[in-house]
Each structure stands twice: as C-alpha cells, then as structure tokens.
Image: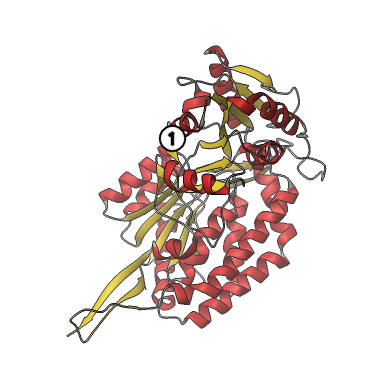
C-alpha cells in the first residue's frame, strides 16, 4: 500500500511512500524494545546531554525542517520556523526539569522508609496529527525519552517527511538507534500495533472518532491511553472588556494555523452591550487576513492542509447558513488553486447548526450574542468539547473567578488567547479527551508510580 504527500498550495505531489509490512513493523518494534532495555537504566545526566543536543539539531536545521512543514501541510514559513523553535524549547525544558519531576517522593508512614519511585513503562505509541507536525510529536517525545521510555511514532499520512526528519533529529542528537522510531504506516495498521505486547501505552492527538477507536483498542488490551482530541473553544467578551484587545486576540486565535488548531478560538460569545462594536472591530481584524503563498512573508492566511478538509469546512458553513446563520465575511471557496478558505464570520449562530455544535477546523468564526455573563457561561459550557476557553474583562478578579470556577475546559485564559506552554499542563475534558501533556503532569503520565516500602 502506498500513500502520498502533496503540497496544499501548489497541489503538486511531493513524494510517495510504501507502507511497512507486518514483518518490517515487528522488526522495528523489537529493535525499539532492545533500545529501551538499555536506555531505561541511563542516567539523567546522559539523557539531558542528548536532549540538549536535540534542541541544538533543531535550531541548526531550523530552515530545512520549517520548509518541509510548510510544503507538506501548508502553514506559513514564518509559523513553521516558530514551531521548530518551540520544539527546541520543549527539549531544553525537559532536559533541565525531568530529574526534579521524577525524583523519589518520601512518604511518611509506619514503615522504616516508604517512598514513590517513578519508573519508565517502555514503548509508547504516539499517533500524531498534521496540523503542528513537529510540535505535537516533540511535546510527547521530549518528556517520554527523558523519563526513560522509548517512542514509536505513527504520523499523519500527509506529513511523512516530517516524521522522517523527527527521527533524524534524535539520531543526530546521539540517542540510541531505535529509541525513537518513525513508522511509515497507514491508520489501518495502528490497531495491530496497539495489540502488540511490546507496546505499553498509547497517546493520540486527533479527532473524536480516531480517539474513540484508539482508546477502545487500548482498553481492550488493558493499556493506558492519553487523548487530546477536538475543541470548540469559547471566547467570552464581557461588557467591561478592552474591545480592541479582544478583537485582536480573538482574530489571531481564530486565524492561527489557518484556523487548524484544536485550541483555536471557535465560538465567540459576546454580551449584547458591546456586541455591535466588538463585531465591527473583529470583522476588521479578520478582513485583514491575506491569502497567499506560505513562503511570502506578507501572507497571513495560508492554505488549509488538504482540499477535502477545506470542502468539509465549507459544507459545515453552508449547512449552518441553511439553518439560519448569517455570513458577514467570507464564506465562499475562492476561485484559485490551493486548499484556500477565506477568513469567515457567521452570526446568528444557534443550537442545531454545525457552527454551534461541531468543531469548525478552519478560519471560520461563530459569533453568538448573549444578554449577560450568566448566559455567556451557560452557552460556553453548552458543548461536547472542553479543551480551552478564554474570557475578556478588565476586572481581572472577575476573569479569574470565571476561568477557575465557571468554565468547563482544561485550559482557561483571561485576556489572552489559549496556547500551549511546556511549563503548564495541557489537555481537555469531555469529548476533548483525557490525560495531560507537558509540565510535571505530562512527564508522569507514562510512568509507573511505584510504591517502595521498607519495614
């Protein structure tokens, strides 16, 4: 079986790859297991040295890796450069922090000595998406390898060269061959890999459907899973918000990565008192988005990753319009080559519409007018998703109260669009998944918290 990578801007085929056979997969997994058996006893000093090397390799090859990201999934070259730098950051972060995060925890009991020791689990399968093809992988791999585990990657089929280059980073950094393994396989082959007893756990970032399939397979084999799935993040703009700030932040979040971000702003819930003025400012910000070549520094809205994804998004827009939504900006597929979709704003969005109920994975904003804070919170939580949320208010204590107590999401920000940060745990609730990545919480997900008791 073969699969292709293609450039969503030029629509040219970049490369074609053969999927690995069952025998080839088994050989790679056995090699990874051998590498893990040696690696699990390595010192933190050795791991740190190699992970800092990985950060250096990323920075030394930043332009090469960024170009591949842009060519395979379409994002602007400037965004791709920033993504590679963020990967170097997470490598450096865990190189410096892992030993402290995983030190033994002394627990006072009636024992002579009792403590919790964090021990690696083994081979962790990572099923990763295309939207941040380097960052999504490194935010898993850096803590996993620093913890003494081994990583096995099944990357999205439209970014195969990214997967190849990520494996290259760890080899160039001096990690043992096989410790991080990229598998050129199809989605249909994932189930068999999860069943393989060599694999001890699985992490997936992707759709609800993919997450449900992987989680059910992992559960059937009594293996741990961490899932980061879709999101329909609500951004609340209250009557006391700085509207210029809110409009800029909301537009930036909605247009980030051409709208293809799980934690991108999706639903904009605006208190009526400031609705008209906010909408005017927000529309102006969205209208400034310039579609074009990802390698043109003036481009702010690159193509989406694939034309089929663009067409699915447009179908959601049309279905919402048919049910009563209004389009005040964009909403039409441009007559040009490439998987482009314009910055789009839908108003009068209500339950029963895709723009209200579903994740719109592209540069389309759903705007909802409410009477007050209470209604804004109710609608924000009226979603099957719970990944991120944001509230804009000049009363910081009010914003903190809403973020901490009221909003149902894994990450809640005040006066700043939601973003991931190696220092903070990242993940969702409800249909947005379970488990956490990044920070102390992320590195401990794939560890055996072992109790040791000395009588």
> Percent from the top left, x then y, of residue 234?
53, 36
Q: On the rendered structure, is 108 left or right of 371?
A: left
Indicate the secondary structure of the residue bearing disc 1: helix
> Percent from the top left, x then y, of residue 303?
69, 36
Q: How busy is the neighbourhood of tag 1: few (under 14 within 10 Å), some, or many (20 plus)?
A: some
Q: Is residue 319 visible?
A: yes
At x 59%, y 43%, the residue is 158
Residue nearest the observer in this picture, 79 or 309: 79
Q: How is the image coloured?
A: secondary structure
At x 57%, y 76%, the residue is 50
In terms of image quadrants, where is residue 443?
bottom left
At x 42%, y 31%, the residue is 382
In terms of image quadrants, where is residue 81?
bottom right
Q: On the rendered structure, is 290 left or right of 261?
A: right
In terms of image quadrants, where is residue 165?
bottom right
> Percent from the top left, x then y, of residue 170?
57, 68
Say above or below: 115 vs 182. below
Residue nearest the observer in this picture, 422 or 145: 422
Label total for image: 1
The residue under label 1 is: 381
Say above or below: 295 vs 123. above
Q: Is residue 342 visible?
A: no
> Percent from the top left, x then y, of residue 293?
78, 39
Q: In the rendered image, which quarter contains the C terminus?
A: bottom left
At x 41%, y 60%, the residue is 124
């Amino acid at each position: 079986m073969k699969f292709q990578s293609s450039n969503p801007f030029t629509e040219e085929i970049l490369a074609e790859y053969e999927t690995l056979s069952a025998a080839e997969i088994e050989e790679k997994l056995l090699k990874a297991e051998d590498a893990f058996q040696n690696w699990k006893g390595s010192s933190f000093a050795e791991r740190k040295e190699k992970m800092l090397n990985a950060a250096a390799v990323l920075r030394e090859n930043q332009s090469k890796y960024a170009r591949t990201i842009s060519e395979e999934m379409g994002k602007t070259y400037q965004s791709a450069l920033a993504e590679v730098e963020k990967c170097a950051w997470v490598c450096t972060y865990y190189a410096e922090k892992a030993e402290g995060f995983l030190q033994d925890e002394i627990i006072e009991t009636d024992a002579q000595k009792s403590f919790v020791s964090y021990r690696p689990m083994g081979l962790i399968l990572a099923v990763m998406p295309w939207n941040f093809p380097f960052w999504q992988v490194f935010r898993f791999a850096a803590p996993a390898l620093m913890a003494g585990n081994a990583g096995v990657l099944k990357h999205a089929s439209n970014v195969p060269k990214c997967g190849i280059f990520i494996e290259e980073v760890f080899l160039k950094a001096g990690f043992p061959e096989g410790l991080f393994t990229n598998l050129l396989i199809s989605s249909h082959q994932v189930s068999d890999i999860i069943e393989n007893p060599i694999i001890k756990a699985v992490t997936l970032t992707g759709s609800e459907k993919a997450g449900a399939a992987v989680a059910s397979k992992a559960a059937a084999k009594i293996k741990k899973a961490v899932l980061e799935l879709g999101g329909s993040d609500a951004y609340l703009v209250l009557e006391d918000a700085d509207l210029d700030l809110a409009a800029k932040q909301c537009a930036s979040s909605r247009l980030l990565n051409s709208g293809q971000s799980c934690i991108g702003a999706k639903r904009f819930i605006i208190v009526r008192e400031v609705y008209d003025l906010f909408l005017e400012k927000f529309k102006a910000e969205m209208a400034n988005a310039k579609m074009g070549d990802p390698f043109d520094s003036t481009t702010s809205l690159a193509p989406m990753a694939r034309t089929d994804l663009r067409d699915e998004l447009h179908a959601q827009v049309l279905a919402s319009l048919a049910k009563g939504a209004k389009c005040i900006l964009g909403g039409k597929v441009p007559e040009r080559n490439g998987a482009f979709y314009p910055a789009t704003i839908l108003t009068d969005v209500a339950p029963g519409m895709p723009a209200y109920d579903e994740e719109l994975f592209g540069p389309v904003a759903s705007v909802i007018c409410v009477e007050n804070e209470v209604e804004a919170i109710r609608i924000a939580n009226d979603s099957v998703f719970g990944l991120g949320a944001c509230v804009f208010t000049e009363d910081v204590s009010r914003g903190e109260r809403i973020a901490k107590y009221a909003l149902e999401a894994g990450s809640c920000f005040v006066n700043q669009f939601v973003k991931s940060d190696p220092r903070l745990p990242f993940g969702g609730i409800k249909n947005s998944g379970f488990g956490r990545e990044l920070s102390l919480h992320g590195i401990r997900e794939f560890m055996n918290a072992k109790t040791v008791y000395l009588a």
